[in-house]
Image (cartoon, rainbow, N blue to C red):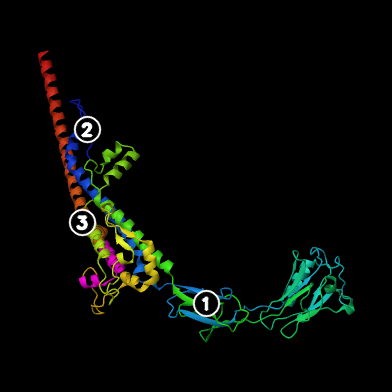
Amino acid sequence: MAIRISGLASGMDTDTMVKELMTAHRKPLDKIYKQKELANWKIDAYREVNTKLLEYRKSMEDLRLQRPFNSMIATSSNPNAITATTTGTPTQSSYEIKNISLAKQESAASVKFFTSGFDTTKTLTELGINVDSTTSKVELSVNGTNVSLDPTMKLSDALNAISTQAAVSVSYSATDKSFTFTDSTKGSNSKVIISETTTNGSNFLSTLNMVSGEVSSTQNTFGNSSTISSVVGSDKQQASAEINGLLYKSDTNSITYDGMQFDLLGVPQDNTVPITVTAKPDNDKIFESIKTFVDGYNQLIEDLNTLYSEKKSRSYQPLTSDEKEAMTDKEVELWEERAKVGLLGRDPILSKVLTSMRSAMYTPVKGADAGATNPIDTLEEIGIKLSTKWEENGKLELDENKLKGMISSNLTKVAEVFNKSTSSLAATDDSNTIKSQTKFSESGVADRIYERLEATMKEFTKQALSGSQSTIGKQLTSFDTRIAAFESRLVNIEDRYYRQFAAMEKAIQRANSQSSWLSQQLG
């Protein structure tokens, strides 16, 4: 770029003058920039609405797929022995369970000796334990393994040595002052056999208030008393129970059958008397699902109507870079917040979805409660009606008592209002409630609303959310092309002004030189 030296002959601030001249030329470009910014804002507005539609569609998906209507609640006649929950869709309303056996995990043989307490930091000699006169060691036998201990060992180290040499777990608890021996092998074959030969002088067991003995699957000489507690090892055992006459087994205390999970908690006193478990619809869950559907719909209607009824203020337009520089960040934020109001005012897509959802709500479901003289085929008949208040703009009013009563007495009919499928069209027909009037009139409310939300989201995508392929995306591409061309034109205009001012400066300089020469000649 050429270096510009302005105003030397005329004394004028050429840069300022050119800038002021260019301001007028930039106004059409600023207008394009503002149009582009408005288009970007509108994309963001559509994206926010699209998110609201998507969230509501997800929230009602279970209702549309009938899941709440299939939910059951189970009760047990003996909840101390067995409880039940539904995991699917039970085919029976009641179950009889008897001959319950709980699962058991594999366990090891173990014996505990209660003592008056010992200091495990003392050596065996300090505790008064004698050595074998032959080996000069403290000797004992554990599970058939001869264990030899140095008398200078601390008691804690001696216990660790027994664990290592005999493959048992030996520990001392200072809390209840006890020694515990547990076989490292689990199952019915595990055992704990402890003995010492006192003829040669070793008295490890008797000094520590322990005794010789055996606990195994064949015998338990230790038994249980105030000073000894022992348990025989056992194999893993499956849980089992007879359900409606058939035997079922499980590795855990839960048995799954016919969409039900039966949790075995204990064995009843009379195991031959059947415990009855009944399954019935979870009316509370069904009510809450429908209430969520209504509340979500009302919030969505309120949000969409607010956007649709907003009026755009022509006094607030997007700001140019120069305008932003003249304002504080907070002022810019408040300005743009006001400028974004009304972006979707009277938007045709919003108008369409509001109208179509209202129609989907109040149009009767043809064929629901078929054969009845006064069929239950509208939301109003189950306790949900369109508000008559004009300011509510099509919100729903929920009569909770009426809906709960209908769920209790006419659950199948309530479900049909939401989930009925058309029967007039062939199974291979792939039309939806928007393309087919037949399918619309014969489909439940949930399907109608779901498909209208989906269709609206597709329109948003086509209008604004598919990048450069959307309608607004193409406008943005056009704006960018126009801006690039206009900026190139402004560069040429600015260069022309500088050339013109440069030529003027030269002319003034020549005139000044001629004037000076004439003055000299006349001087």
Left or right of 158: which side holds 514? left
Amino acid type assigned to the residue bearing label 2 in the image: Asp
- Gap between marks 3 and 2 measured at Cα: 49 Å
Dot placed on the residue nearer the N-terminal end, 3 or 1: 1
Crowding at dot 3, Cα within 10 Å, few <14 / some 14-19 / many 20+, comes out as few
Q: Distance between the residues labelled 1 and 2?
A: 88 Å
| Residue 464: % across, % down | 25, 57
Kindly tell me whether residue 50 is visible in this rendering: yes
Find residue 408 and report its horizontal and vertical position in percent. Answer: 40, 70
In front of the other: 510 or 19: 19
The location of residue 151, given as percent across then percent down, is 84, 69
Marks 3 and 1 sit apart, C-alpha to C-alpha, by 55 Å
- Please state the extent of the stretch shown in magenta in the rendering: 436-457
Disc 2 crowd, CA 10 A, few/some/many (<14, 14-19, 20+): some
To which residue does mark 1 refer?
262
Q: Which of marks 1 and 2 is nearer the N terminus?
A: 2
Closer to the camera: disc 3 or disc 2? 3
State which quadrant residue 52 falls in.
Answer: bottom left
Q: Which of marks 3 and 1 is in front?
A: 1
Which part of the image, by quadrant, shows the N terminus? top left
* Residue 449 part of the magenta segment: yes
In the rendered image, the quadrant that contains the C terminus is top left
Mark 1: secondary structure: strand
Query: Which secondary structure lies at badge 3?
Result: helix
Quadrant of res 319: top left
The kind of residue tagged 1 is Phe
Residue at which label 3 appears: 348
Q: Mark 2 points at which residue?
A: 15
Badge 2 element:
helix
